[in-house]
Image (tube, rainbow, N blue to C red):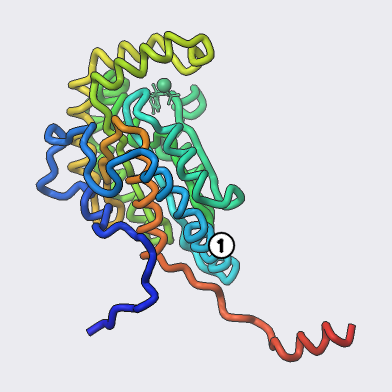
């Protein structure tokens, strides 16, 4: 039996946030309460303090991940964010940025594909942005748009998008086997909260750039989008690339949950420094003599 380590004093979450939020066979998206506090601190100040407290540990794990790749390791982390407009993907990226080393982060954003991108397979442009060994990638939207907005708006015929779920699973498996650890997160807000946030954007001229009139058109199709999310989560939450659903009406709780997911994942990856490739004593002597 494993002995409990005595110096295990870290205020780590008592529950596994991954276990709590993971989309399994019984998962029901319609039962998620976007305002609920599902774990951790019940107030903003404490939650943000705990987010900040992860910085040292996550930075260290990130450095080890990078060092591992310098020794030939191929592992890297891909944090994929999906959610309706105003669900907080940008805010979530800031929270991850806060606890990590900027040099090891690769952020990619996916809007509507260009004409040139449309001529290629839908996974092509995604593949261009995958994180390289030793780094952490963040996707603000992703290939899932190709079974979400594309499905809801009939941008390709049903027989086309229907095939994509299996294609996505096979493609993610290929990259998981190549060393990518997937952390796929849906930021789940309620339609009421979205209304507030859209109105807040309209109320402030400095926020108008974030508002697109098209956001309201998507909002009017809320139920269709939720149905498309339900199917994507059910069909593409796999052992090699599971989905997590984050209740996101409260920004500080969203950030707490997401950063715990990131920290838990990196801890489990447990990246290792590569073995020293030279004779330390001999090198010391050389440096002394130089
Ligand atoms: P935003 O993330 O708010 O800047 O908006 C990006 C927009 O691009 C959203 O309306 C997405 O639905 C849209 N988008 C992203 N990927 C695709 C795609 N593959 N096909 C069509 N629209 C997309
Ligand atoms: Mg938007």
Q: Position of residue 98 (x, y in %)?
A: 51, 45
Q: Residue at x 30, y 34 (%)?
A: 248
Could you say which is closer to the camera, residue 228 or residue 150? 228
Q: Residue at x 24, y 52 (%)?
A: 238
Find the residue positioned furthest to the right: 290
- Quadrant field for ligand 2: top left
Q: Position of residue 282 (x, y in %)?
A: 75, 90
In the image, residue 7 above or below residue 261: below
Q: Position of residue 162 (x, y in %)?
A: 22, 34
Left or right: 61, with 25 as reference point: right
Mark 1 secondary-structure assignment? helix
Quarter holding the N terminus?
bottom left
In the image, residue 49 above or below residue 60: above
Left or right: 264, with 26 as reference point: right
Q: Using the rendered image of the protein, determine whether residue 80 is visible from the camera's viewpoint.
A: no
Quarter holding the C terminus?
bottom right
Q: Which residue, given by chain and number where applicable, does mark 1 sit on?
A: 63
Left or right: 178, with 280 as reference point: left
């Amino acid at each position: 039996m494993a002995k409990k380590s005595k110096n295990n004093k870290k205020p780590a979450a008592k529950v596994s946030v991954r276990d709590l939020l993971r989309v399994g066979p019984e998962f029901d998206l319609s039962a998620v309460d976007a305002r609920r506090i599902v774990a951790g601190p019940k107030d903003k100040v404490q939650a943000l303090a705990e987010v900040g407290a992860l910085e040292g540990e996550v930075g260290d794990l990130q450095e080890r991940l990078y060092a591992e790749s310098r020794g030939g390791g191929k592992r890297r982390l891909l944090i994929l964010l999906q959610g309706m407009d105003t669900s907080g993907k940008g805010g979530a990226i800031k929270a991850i940025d806060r606890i990590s080393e900027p040099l090891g982060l690769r952020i990619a954003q996916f809007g509507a594909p260009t004409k040139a991108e449309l001529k290629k397979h839908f996974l092509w442009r995604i593949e261009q942005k995958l994180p390289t060994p030793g780094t952490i990638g963040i996707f603000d939207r992703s290939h899932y748009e190709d079974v979400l907005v594309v499905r809801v708006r009939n941008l390709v015929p049903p027989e086309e998008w229907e095939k994509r779920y299996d294609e996505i699973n096979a493609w993610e498996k290929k990259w998981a086997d190549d060393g990518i650890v997937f952390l796929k997160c849906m930021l789940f807000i309620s339609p009421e909260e979205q209304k507030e946030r859209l109105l807040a954007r309209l109320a402030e001229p400095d926020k108008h750039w974030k508002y697109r009139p098209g956001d309201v058109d998507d909002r009017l199709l809320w139920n269709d989008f939720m149905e498309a999310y339900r199917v994507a989560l059910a069909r593409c939450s796999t052992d090699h690339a599971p989905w997590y659903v984050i209740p996101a009406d409260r920004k500080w709780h969203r950030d707490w949950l997401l950063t715990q997911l990131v920290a838990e994942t990196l801890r489990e990856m447990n990246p290792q420094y590569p073995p020293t490739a030279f004779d330390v004593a001999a090198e010391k002597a050389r440096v002394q003599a130089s």
